Amino acid sequence: MSRRVAVIGGGLAGLTAALAAARAGANVTLIVGGQGVHHLFSGCLDVLAYPAGAAEPVENPLAAVAKLAAENPRHPYALVGVDRLRRALAFFRQELAAAGVELLGDGETQRRVVTAFGTLRPTALVPATMAAAPKRIAAVCNLSGFGNFSAALTAGELGRRLGRAVAALDFAGPAARRDAIGLSHALARPDYAVALGDFLRERAPGQTVLIPAVLGPENTLAVKRGIEERFGGELCEAPGQPPSLPGLRLFTALRRRVLDAGVRVAQAARVVGPVVENGRLTGLRVKTGPFEQIETADAFVLATGHLVSGGLVGDREGLREPVFALPVVGASGRPYFDAAFLSPGGHPALATGVATDERLRPLSGERPLFDNLFAGGDILAGFDPYRERSGGGVAVATGDLAGRYAAGDVS
């Protein structure tokens, strides 16, 4: 009989945990409370860019992870290890590729993505739609007066960084809604795509052109290649302000793989507490609207995220974990937030979370709260995903490992 696993959380760690457990042969239920913060995700997967004290991004993320793990045994990467991280990234890439989303990179090289502000963002795994080397970009083109993007601003800053001129273009095009979703649907229309290709053939023939990240939610690479064939050059998306279509694409593809793997998804469901029998976690109290039911399983994964997604909540008494009342550690008596919004040292609250043992089992005191409860993703203590630029890698690595632990698939 298959081992039953319940995963709480529909973010990057939760989806990865559910998929890993299902691929390991478990019968998996994924409990999702809402739509999450998928629209804030750039679509790039950061592994590690700025270890503690680093002013410049490291050039080999996996090598930096090995050094970080040796220096900081409480960091989630130290619990996973470089070899498991490498395998988790490969598993993640393969699953997304099967759903039509191609991520380039293996974690050995820090890549650079040009953002909508003309800056160069370090990251490890990059969507194929953003993969053009910055030095090849000759022009920046806005589409239909899209208000969240300025070709002139982006071209000016990118040109300053590259030390040469970058052209700024504005494509009026056929009628289209002037927002990210509207433009993505317009680009899927033959008339709009053909008109853009013809415009670029006249203004930037054979060149690499940066555009807003609005290439569309489906068949993205086919849309991109069709326009490229029209003008003989290369398109490159620039991640910018939300909603992030590359992030939505990635999560849509990952969710499709989860469903294809046979995972049962309980949507709009909120876990309000555990069911404990003789000291063992046997189930979860789950509310959907006014109704409450018990979700039983053999093992459980907590992947509810951090403050933004409600994995941790705050009140006058401090931060707390609301499902299992787990201790929140990491601030060490300091104020949770620095007075400077863009504090170079980060905000202490962002490095708080739940401590675990070496098998990713959340601790209550010195011991795991339950032998069959595992955790992954931003809810973990010991790291600051924003300052380090490590959130995506930690989510995938710990989600994968927590799912496999829950499924009984780790030697």
Image: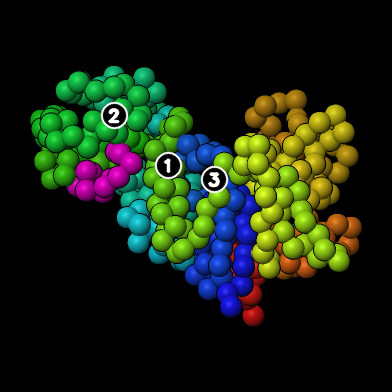
> Which quarter of the picture shows residue 287?
top right
- Magenta residues span 215-225
**Which numbered disc covers residue 267?**
3
**Which numbered disc covers residue 183?**
2
Q: Position of residue 282 (x, y in %)?
A: 74, 63
Residue at the (29%, 22%) spot, across then down: 177
Q: Position of residue 248 (x, y in %)?
A: 42, 42
Crowd rating for badge 3 (residues with CA inside 10 Å; few <14, some 14–19, many 20+): some
Task: Residue under label 1, please give it.
Answer: 248
Label 3–label 2 contact, CB within 8 A = no
Classify residue 362 as left or right of residue 209.
right
- Residue sitting at the far bottom: 411
Under mark 1, the amino acid is Leu
Under mark 2, the amino acid is Leu
Determine the CA span between mark 1 and mark 2. Answer: 15 Å
* 3 vs 1, front mark: 3
Classify residue 153 as left or right of residue 137.
right
In depth, the one of 223 and 75 nearer the eye is: 223
Crowd rating for badge 2 (residues with CA inside 10 Å; few <14, some 14–19, many 20+): many
Disc 3 element: loop
Label 1–label 2 contact, CB within 8 A = no
Residue at the (67%, 64%) spot, across then down: 297
Crowd rating for badge 1 (residues with CA inside 10 Å; few <14, some 14–19, many 20+): many
**Which numbered disc covers residue 406?**
none
The answer to whether residue 348 of the structure is visible from this angle is no
Q: In which quarter of the image is the C terminus?
A: bottom right
